Image: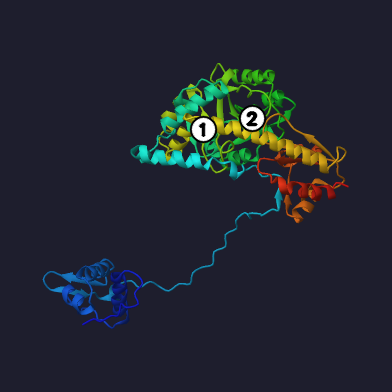
Amino acid sequence: MLTYDFSRSDGPIYKELYQKIRQDILSGLIKSGEKLPSKRNLAQNLGVSTITIENAYDQLICEGYIYTEEKKGYFVSDIKKLSKPKAISKPKVYIEKARTNQFVFDFSSNNMETRNFPFSIWAKLNREVLSEMQEKVLNVSPSSGVEELRCAITKHLLSFRGMEVDPDQIIIGAGTENLYEILIKLMGNEKTYCIENPGYTKIRKVYEINSVNYVCASIDDKGMNIKELIESNAQIAHISPNHHFPTGITMPASRRYEILGWANEKNDRYVIEDDYDSEFRQNGNPIPTLQSIDAFGKVIYMNTFSKSIASTIRISYMVLPEKLANRYYKSLDFYSCPVPTLEQYTLAKFIDEGYFEKHINRMRLYYRRKREKVLEILRKNISESECSILESDSGLHMILKLNSRVSDKKLKSHLLSEGINIDMLSQYYSKNAERLQHMYILNYSNINLEKFSDAIKVLKKYLA
């Protein structure tokens, strides 16, 4: 009779019994063809339930160590026929990952301050969704996103941006990079895209990784240079007219109509309007979108909640012209929406019940005051002869033009050695960045004001 001690067992007894019998079979203590005790007899001998014995035997049968004959019992298999796994040494794995630097101070972080996230309201709405919409939360979301969120965004765009759109024109995505890739599939890889120079570097990376042909048009004081756009022979212009990053330029109406005129000249031309940072215009009303003055269905409008609510709220959306929306539902509707339905319904309630508007108004006031404090600290610690501040009425960053004899690369290297990170404006250019020496980007959305003065003093050391 098999006898085993389970007094020190720290897991399921059936699993330990299976392992002990298996080991005895492999070691030869239990011979091939030998009959095992019945479930009832072994259970009585070991002081366990017959269910425990049955579970252990079933696992051994599944793995081929024993077999059963009707009305005869359980027998040990011929383990010579079993393929024994060869002992192999685990190979060493070398994976190179981008290093995540921990800075003492980071002028370039564009994350939002976590303390400003409406935790209590979001948790309340989350609970309500789980309580009231259980069946909907577990239903598969349409590829374009749940209707409730698309309808909420439609109402928001009408009241906040003066845009009249249909909910079915809206496509929900997990971040703007996700939407860029959807657009590439929708437009086709054979199209040529014209992007801004300087511009948001992720746009270039997304196009490159998707083998998309793109060209650059320089930015002048009105936005994308129309002459270079025309000469580029591109079919799609990718712009951020309401608040260009990194220059902060807002495109005037005259240039907007020029670009719309360019798009209307040919059927296959479109404009991607990335409404980056538009919620944080500090003075006056928000600038009307290019989409709102587009009469011919040429503008694809894009925006995200990552900047307005929290950096980790990876929910973005785009508004497709009617023609492209129909093409999307015909050719790409089989894709799953990558945003969890729970988050979509929670955000829909956040918008519908007025919390989003209140949050934006509160954040505008907060960042206006923070901007004033940043400017005050700058002027207090660094003279006008050492630093010029270039800023616009929009967004959460400004440009510092430093008067320094040290080259950009050396200055950045000196600061990194002291744990301080700052981005050069020239980093955002794909070409012709030589004239931009000593121009740096200061994102103040996530700046720690208590450490800001000390960081500026360190920066000042290298201006002489």
Q: Taking 202 as reference, is 317 above or below it? A: above
Residue 156 in the figure: left or right of residue 128 = right
Query: Total of numbered circles in the picture?
Result: 2
Residue 146 in the figure: left or right of residue 432 = left
Which of the pair 239/332 is nearer the observer?
Answer: 239
Q: At x 72% / y 48%, what residue is drawn? A: 450
> Which numbered disc flags the more N-terminal residue, 2 or 1?
2
- Kindly state the secondary structure of the residue where label 1 is placed: helix
Residue 139 seen in the figure: no
The spot of residue 164 in percent (x, y) is 51, 20
Residue 189 in the figure: left or right of residue 51 = right
Q: At x 18% / y 73%, what residue is drawn? A: 39
Q: Taking 31 as reference, is 320 above or below it? A: above
The spot of residue 346 in percent (x, y) is 45, 37
Which of the pair 358/83 is nearer the observer?
Answer: 358
Question: Mark number for residue 355?
Answer: 1
Mark 1 burial class by Cα count in 10 Å: few <14, some 14-19, many 20+: some
Q: Amino acid at mark 1?
A: Tyr
Which of the pair 148/222 is nearer the observer?
Answer: 148
Q: Quadrant of residue 443?
A: top right
Q: Residue under circle 2?
A: 240
Q: Quadrant of residue 49?
A: bottom left
> Marks 2 and 1: CB-CB under 8 Å?
no
Q: Amino acid at mark 2?
A: Ser
Q: Taking 165 as reference, is 422 above or below it? A: below
Q: Mark 2 to mark 1: distance in Å?
A: 27 Å
- Looking at the rendered image, the disc whose residue lies closer to the viewer, 2 or 1, is 1
